[in-house]
Image (spheres, coloured by chain):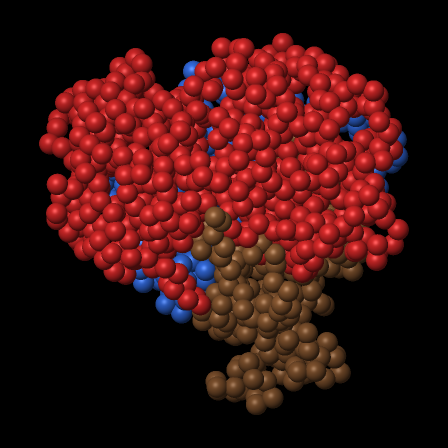
Amino acid sequence: MPYVSNEDAKVDEQTAPGRLTKILDSDMFHSFLRSKVTVVAACGTLFLFLLALLAPWVAPHNPFDLASISIMDARVPPVWMEYSDPRFLLGTDDQGRDLLSGIFYGMRISLIVGFCSVAAAAVLGITLGLVAGYMGGRVDAVIMRIADVQLTFPAILIALLIDGIAAGVFGSIDREIFAFYILIVSLSLSFWVQYARTVRGSTMVEKNKEYVQAARVIGIPSAIIMARHILPNVMGPVMVIATINLALAIVTEATLSFLGVGMPPTQPSLGTLIAIGNDFLYSGEWWIAIFPGLALALLVLNVNLLGDWLRDALNPKLR
Amino acid sequence: MIGFATRRLLQAMIVMLVVALLAFTMFRFVGDPVNQMVGIETSIEEREALRERLGLNDPIPVQFFRFVTQAAQFNFGTSYQFRQPVSDLFAKRIPATLELSFTSALFALVVGIPMGIYAGLNRESAVSKLFLSVSLIGISLPTFFIGILLIFLFSVTLQWLPSFGRGEVVPVGSWWTTGFLTVSGLKALILPSITLGLYQMTLIMRLIRAEMLEVIRTDYIKFARARGLPDRLVNFRHALKNTLVPVITITGLQLGAIIAFATITETVFQWPGMGLMFLQAVQNVDIPIMSAYLLLTAFLFVAINFIVDILYFFIDPRLRVGRP
Amino acid sequence: MNVLDIKNLTVEFPGRKSVFVAVDDVDMSVEAGKILGVVGESGAGKSTVGNAVIGLLQEPGHIAGGEIFLHGKRIDQLPYKDKRLLRGRKIGMIFQDPLTSLDPLQTVESQLVETIRTHMPFSGNEARKRAVELIDAVGIPDPEERIKQYPHQFSGGMRQRVVIALALCAEPELVIADEPTTALDVSIQAQILELMKKLCEERNVAMLVITHDMGVIADITDHVAVMYHGELVEYGETTQVLGAPKHPYTQSLISAVPRPDIRVERFPVVNYIEKAGTPQKQIDISTHWLGKSRDYEKVEGPLVQIRGLDMRFETRGSIFPSRRKYFQAVKKVSFDIQEGETFGLVGESGSGKSTIARLVTGLYQPSGGSILFGKTELTSLKNRKDVLAMRRQMQMIFQDPYSSLNARMRVRDIIAEPIKFHKLASGNSEVRQIVDDLLDHVGLGVAAGQKFPHEFSGGQRQRISIARALATRPRFLICDEPTSALDVSIQAQILNLLKDLQEELGLTMLFISHDLAVIRQMCNRIGVMRHGELCEVSGCDQLFEAPQHAYTRELLELMPSMELLSRANLESA
């Protein structure tokens, strides 16, 4: 006599809960709420992004408006120090530009460069990683050897080399005009390897899973299998890398600008501002370098905190 | 063992050849080498004669072959800026960079490894969490900004340590100079090596912690506990040894990266090393120095990787002894 | 006196939303020299009992109630350090997977010696001597030599012997074995079980064997505890419980176990855990879309003819052809499959049976030989259109229900994909109707379509896999170990479903399994494989009653005997 229980292979007819309820109820969202540091970091990141995005509206001055800048206001210290000027909360730089506004605008440029290069690196790296992992054999060997050679040079070195080459090709006057694009090319060329290696690794795991074999048995062509089946399943680690990479891209851009091969002083990013301020460090005008530096550190720290949490939350082994 | 080493050596040579091809392409095709070497008033005939003498009219493969043979003998041509052989320029600056890199690497390993092991074994302890937070700040602060902060604090405000240069150096042997033997040399080394090593230290610490956490979850660690082995044996003989394989890879890569990151630190501290020279070369489009630097860093990297592979061989018996 | 006494044990895992009770008020005990089996399906809490006894519960699990006694001394409340001293010294543990249980970087000797010296006041030399004796006792030849080797130099079965030696290092009074033979082949399983039984009697050790396999229980245990959802449903002498089960769960569980000695037409429906899905809506196969698969042109002779099939994989690549090394996975295999029959392939791991499935479906290109499907030679198909036409006619059901469905796609899209890809329906509304009918037909119901795979159990996922395979209206279905990842009760349902579908749709099947008992239930003719070669092809009954090849006889002898098991509810075919 078979024993009958209430459980049923047939799926309940009840309506599936809405997407938002599902997200709010997910383990991931709860792990997010449980980590107070992460919540603070998320709010901080959002706040800084908004400041950068809305810089033209929230900044007290426009540092690019030559008419409003006066060299008379140069090197004014922050408001809590002697000889300060209440118009300039954090003081001014060597040309009399308001430092706080400069930081907002600089953050905007840093973030644009960061996002663009992360996007370009991700597209390049994911494509190559998918192809290498799925095809295997010679294609894989070639792509991975290139990646190996690339890994021989740290990002900063590649970016410096590309910049040097660009200067050789364009001449140094055009370099200023193309600085933005050169930066993005050099940053994305130095970061794609990480995506490619990670995606290749996960692709090699995924392609041996039976759902991919099932798709092949159905007869679906490789390109569609890669795009529709494998890609969505390898995106988890990519998100983690992209977040951490955004932080790294911002830092690298700042470093290049600091070294004088990134954004020019006419379009200053945070790194350019620090480079300008560095010259005045010894003469006691520390704020010109330190405040943009702190802003940079704060931005990167917040993004890194988010990336760190995302990595732990997406790692099933650490649950 | 010999077969294994030969295979790795072969791979390393292929990588070096590809890098040499890149360096050659840069050397040969970015800008015209002749234009860089002569003045504006030089006639076309004279330029052509120079081209012929330099072999720039030979077939490209021949030129590449000559480039590689010369590079193998440390002949990288003449610097456009300084009008001196590149190899002489490098020889003067290599000791500064290597001493700085060595000190920072030592600092990164000696501090980073114990911190990583501790944080991996005591995941929930307050000290581990402190380590993690500090390390996160460490990787979030750009290297050059750490340098600036250190200078501002210890040189400008407290005036304890010098903010630039190598201090007093003593010659050792025919061309090496060292700062290790003088007080001012050692003092000058402190700030730059902390600046350069801090980032690598945090990376190594985080890596070891992550690997430890991963290994501790494996079946053989559970089985070692189920056999009643004391924690000391489980943690150090079994867990730590198994984390070494991935840790050594990344650590090798990071140590190689130190040489390249030295560029930044050398700029901040006006340290008279290869990196500073490379940066000036980039700004002045001094291609021979750039391509030589490219080859040199690649060589150091490949050499480190080769050593790492050989180390694997001794750690992992699966590479050493085949299946029956 | 009992070595181990468990009284009212309750283990809880606090979760975010609720507390999960993994073990609920369980009592059991083991005497010295006796073996207690704990049996149950996944989620029964049987492994948790073992972990609770040895004090290695995974965080945040903890003992919420009850007592555990070892030789009358309470051990569940001991401080961490004292518990550690019990492990290895008084209680030995054997894990499921011998491939991952040993530290890959240490020799077998150093792992044995460190364990011996941790628990016994031995010098290095004495410990080494004892290690060699232990390795000898667990039946590893050349102990002096082998002990110096690393784990990767041992085969799976040998590694499990090393694990047993490690568990016995300090003469423990109790050994807990958690699925000790699940990762091993039948022939190795028989040896390991025999060794465990022998050691248990010789050394007067009490043993707790945790398993899902009724065969293991029947083979070696003296007593058995049947668990279901954390509760102990039946407990007693093995012969008693298996021969005349009292609890309805035990009854249905036992009736779902496939027997090698009797062929049943359908498995009795086990409804205790998950109700066997029945079609919600009857569809008329003669007029329905799905029934059109019967319209394929009839072929003369066998549907599939495999001749001299060869497959070798490169195990070491080299630019010099003479230095390359190969593994010959399939060697000169030839057999036919008649239209409408189920052909079984049986063999141990590495015998090449799954490789054949992948060769036939075109996932691998064979190194030699021919595969004739109807009149078409599959190995020489070049034209993409012809390839697709063939792909449509044959589909495959895979082993692992957890990896055979794309986790990021809704079930409806998973099933619709082949229909849309092969343009088997006109318009989205027809596709949708077909998908709904298929879901109904495999017993899941229409509502399943809008969910994602992770919302289903293993058995339900396997039904989704089947629906997807049917969605191209194939005439030839390859089942590669379709039930080996499932619990027995679910296995019975899936096997029933496959039988029904075959009958309705007139499918031809290639059924691959390592489990002779399952093969017997499903197949008309059977091929036995070993080391890439086909040893024997016989009719089903003939193979079991009068095996021709020595290897087949060996396999049949090594199978755990199911004679103890009750035969209530079984109808012979």
Answer with left or right where residue C10 lies relative to residue C70: right
Residue A70 drawn above or below residue C158: below
At 30% from the left and 46% from the top, the residue drawn is C235
Q: Nearer the viewer, residue B225 or C246?
A: C246
The red one among the chains is C
Q: Specify the quadrant of the image occupied by residue C10.
A: bottom left
- Outermost residue to the bottom: A86
Q: Colour of chain A?
A: brown
**So how many labels did they put on this image?**
0
Which quarter of the figure has residue C229? bottom left
Residue at image location 45% in from the left, 39% down from the top? C568
What percent of the width, then of the height, locates residue C288?
Answer: 82, 47
The chain whose colour is blue is: B
Task: Mark yes or no: residue B12 visible.
Answer: no
Q: Is residue C463 above or below residue A55?
A: above
Q: Is residue C490 above or below residue A67?
A: above
Q: Position of residue B234 (x, y in %)?
A: 28, 41
- Quadrant of the drawing holding the C terminus of chain C: top right
Please name whichever residue, B192 or C564, is drawn nearer the observer in this view of the structure: C564
